[in-house]
Image (cartoon, grey):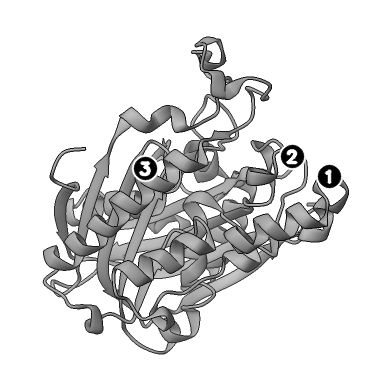
Amino acid sequence: MSLSIGRENATTGARIAGVVSCVPSTIVTNEHFRESFGQEKIDEVAKMIGVQERRWAGESTTTRDLCRTAALHLMDRLEWDPATVDAVLFVSQTPDFRMPATACVLQADLGIGPACIAFDVNLGCSGYTYGLWLAMTMVQSGAARRVLLAVGETMSKIIDHNDRSTAMLFGDAGTVTAVEQGGPDEVAHFVLGSDGTGATNLIIPRGGFRDYSLSGDKRLDGRDPDCMYMDGGEVFVFTLQTVLALATRTMEFAAAKVDEYDGFLFHQANHFMLKQFAKKCKLPMDKVPVNIDRFGNTSSATIPLLLTTNMAQGLKQGRQKLAMFGFGVGYSWASASLSLGPLAVADLIEHNTHQ
């Protein structure tokens, strides 16, 4: 990595109007894994990652379905006419199809007319903060007045259910954030970066148009190439090195101190990492919300899930200054420092597993 932690950019005149997260109704507890892994291994993994339960979508439910349910609820609560939505962004690594773009199908699902910008962004754990930067930049530029930012994953469909390090970690969720024009005092600071030299440490080797399972990488021996592979040690080292620098630089760029923030929202990678971030960045733990115990690691959806669970009451009641940090697959990372609220909508809803 270069000495710079990322590209720095500030947006003006765009605000978050509301957020909705949609999770499958099926709750999978750690008891589900007893027969496969045994209680001792379950306890060992759960202690490190902190996950007690997660939501898994049904066989026929996709990320698009979860995002559609979230979007309909959000638009109804905000009283947004579909005709006033200028863009739909779908950020996910579990789309409906390789082609066409899921955003185009979602635009039709929501009854939004053809005068709409719609496209997909293939990003994982950094996807929400990258997507928020993109949506706010579009509004700032005048390309769109209202944007629906759909971000989510159905991770249960791409993990090896016999691999306890990933099977117990990940959950499913779809989220939609409404971004619209705001006043000149609506300023958001972003730091965005990537390091593709770590790409093969978190990868689905097969399924695209290049088969990495044929590369001779010994780490993949005996593994299903159609499922996600994660080199936990390499990812852990990358995360600690990158996120600590990212958090420091984000606050410097925003010219803000730790005590000015109401919350520091980290991607919910695992509980041990979250505690390390708070300790090394000297952040008070009561300002570092954690919900990985209830939802698992939902990749790009973890930060909006925090907005609609741990932070929801405060965001509905008043204005909050938040720092957000997304990081992971790619390697890719992005942060945001902004104030938002009071929000008319910051809701968590369920999608019937059998819908």
List the single residue furthest toward the right.
Answer: 35
**Nearer the N terminus, badge 3 or badge 1?**
1
The residue located at (32%, 30%) in the rendering is 196
* Disc number placed over residue 36 in the picture, else none: 1
The answer to whether 186 is drawn above or below residue 23 in the figure is below
The N terminus: image quadrant: top left
The residue located at (31%, 55%) in the rendering is 243
Q: Amino acid at mark 3?
A: Ala
- Observer-side mark, 3 or 2, equals 2
**SS of the residue under disc 2:** loop
Q: Amino acid at mark 1?
A: Ser
Residue that mark 3 sits on: 115
- Observer-side mark, 3 or 1, equals 1
The answer to whether 37 is drawn above or below residue 77 in the figure is above
- The quarter of the picture where residue 277 lies is bottom left
Q: Is residue 86 visible?
A: no
The percent coordinates of residue 236 (x first, y second) are 43, 47
Q: Amino acid at mark 2?
A: His
List the single residue furthest toward the bottom.
Answer: 317
* Disc number placed over residue 104 in the picture, else none: none
The percent coordinates of residue 115 (x first, y second) are 36, 42
Q: Nearer the viewer, residue 105 or 221?
A: 221
Q: Left or right: where does residue 138 sit relative to residue 291?
A: left
**Nearer the N terminus, badge 1 or badge 2?**
1
The residue located at (66%, 25%) in the rendering is 223
Bin the neighbour count of mark 3 within 10 Å (Cα to Cα): few under 14, some 14-19, many 20 and up: few
Q: Nearer the viewer, residue 82 or 156?
A: 156
- The quarter of the picture where residue 106 lies is top right
Residue that mark 2 sits on: 161
The percent coordinates of residue 351 (x first, y second) are 70, 59
